[in-house]
């Protein structure tokens, strides 16, 4: 049953992106229009995820997201939190690898929507360039979404938090909203299968500006990991998600 539902869901999921991306082309005239297409795509995906794959998406702690500019640092386990978060933030800008801007159609939207592309090979220069764009976005009241570990990590993997989020926090002097998830139990990375149940994304209590880099990194990792482990324990208590023996550890 899971295999059949996954086949149907994945087919419709990728086809729907093409339909939305093509129909949304006239909206690329403005950044606001591109963001609205992204929100529409996110809502459609959440509907498909629930009704075809059997995964309900629950969002907690929306009151923790400020109205103005801020940094949102999210745990990253699957594709689900990338589109799932956009209907719940009002003017978002993702930090993403620059290569995504070169993808057909998708790249048009990332560029027109003002996403912040990072050249990972440039290292120190990439941090400086990212900060310039992020500072501009914050001044415009945008909410910058970054994945502190830089890539998807399987549930239960050892934390691997990078320096990017710390650098932005200290340079921008902005409030940071940590985000915990359990999505990797339902939409595993590098897997075709989708497992039914209730996936949760939780906005946690904001971290005020002013901490030094090490203190911030320690606090950010601690609150995200503790909350994500709690959410995954809730799923396991309900008997949901990918079987533990099928979770592939990340390559070192």
Image (cartoon, rainbow, N blue to C red):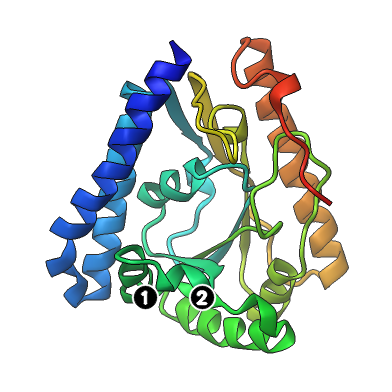
Q: Which mark is residue 117?
A: 2
Q: Does the CB distance between marks 2 and 1 fall below 8 Å? A: yes
| Disc nearer the start of the sequence (2/1) | 1
- Which residue appears at 74% of the width and 31% of the height? 229
Task: Tell me which corner region of the image, top left, top right, bottom left or bottom right, holds residue 174.
Answer: bottom right
Q: Residues within 10 Å of mark 2 (few under 14, many from 20)?
A: many
The residue lying toward the viewer, choosing from 53 and 115, is 53
Task: Give SS at disc 2.
Answer: strand
Q: Which mark is residue 111?
A: 1
Q: Residues within 10 Å of mark 1 (few under 14, many from 20)?
A: some
Q: Is residue 19 left or right of residue 17?
A: left
Q: List x then y, in percent, for residue 31.
A: 27, 74
Q: Is residue 43 above or below residue 246?
A: below
Task: Tell me which corner region of the image, top left, top right, bottom left or bottom right, holds residue 77.
Answer: top right
Q: List x then y, in percent, for residue 110.
A: 38, 69
Figure quadrant of the N terminus: top left
Q: CA distance from mark 2 to mark 1?
A: 8 Å
Q: Is residue 145 among the parts visible in the rendering?
A: yes
- Which residue appears at 53% of the width and 67% of the height? 96
Q: Is residue 47 above or below residue 158?
A: above
Task: Give SS at disc 1.
Answer: helix
Q: Is residue 142 among the parts visible in the rendering?
A: no
């Amino acid at each position: 049953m899971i295999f059949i539902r996954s086949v149907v869901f994945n087919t419709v999921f990728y086809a729907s992106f093409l339909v939305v991306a093509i129909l949304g082309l006239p909206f690329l005239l403005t950044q606001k229009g591109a963001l609205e297409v992204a929100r529409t795509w996110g809502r459609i995906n959440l509907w498909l995820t629930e009704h075809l794959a059997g995964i309900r998406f629950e969002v907690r702690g929306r009151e923790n997201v400020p109205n103005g500019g801020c940094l949102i640092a999210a745990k990253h386990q699957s594709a689900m939190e990338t589109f799932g978060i956009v209907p719940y933030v009002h003017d978002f800008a993702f930090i993403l690898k620059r290569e995504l801007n070169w993808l057909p159609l998708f790249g048009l939207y990332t560029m027109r929507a003002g996403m912040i592309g990072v050249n990972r090979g440039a290292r120190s220069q990439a941090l400086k360039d990212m900060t310039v764009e992020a500072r501009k976005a914050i001044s415009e009241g945008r909410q910058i979404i970054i994945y502190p570990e830089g890539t998807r990590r399987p549930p239960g993997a050892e934390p691997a938090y990078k320096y990017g989020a710390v650098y932005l926090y200290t340079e921008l002097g902005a409030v940071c909203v940590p985000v915990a998830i359990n999505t990797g139990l339902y939409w595993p990375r590098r897997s075709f299968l989708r497992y039914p149940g209730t996936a949760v994304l939780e906005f946690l209590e904001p971290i005020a500006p002013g901490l030094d880099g090490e203190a911030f990194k320690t606090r950010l990792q601690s609150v995200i990991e503790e909350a994500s482990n709690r959410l995954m324990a809730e799923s396991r208590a309900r008997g949901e998600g990918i079987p533990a023996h099928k979770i592939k550890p990340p390559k070192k």
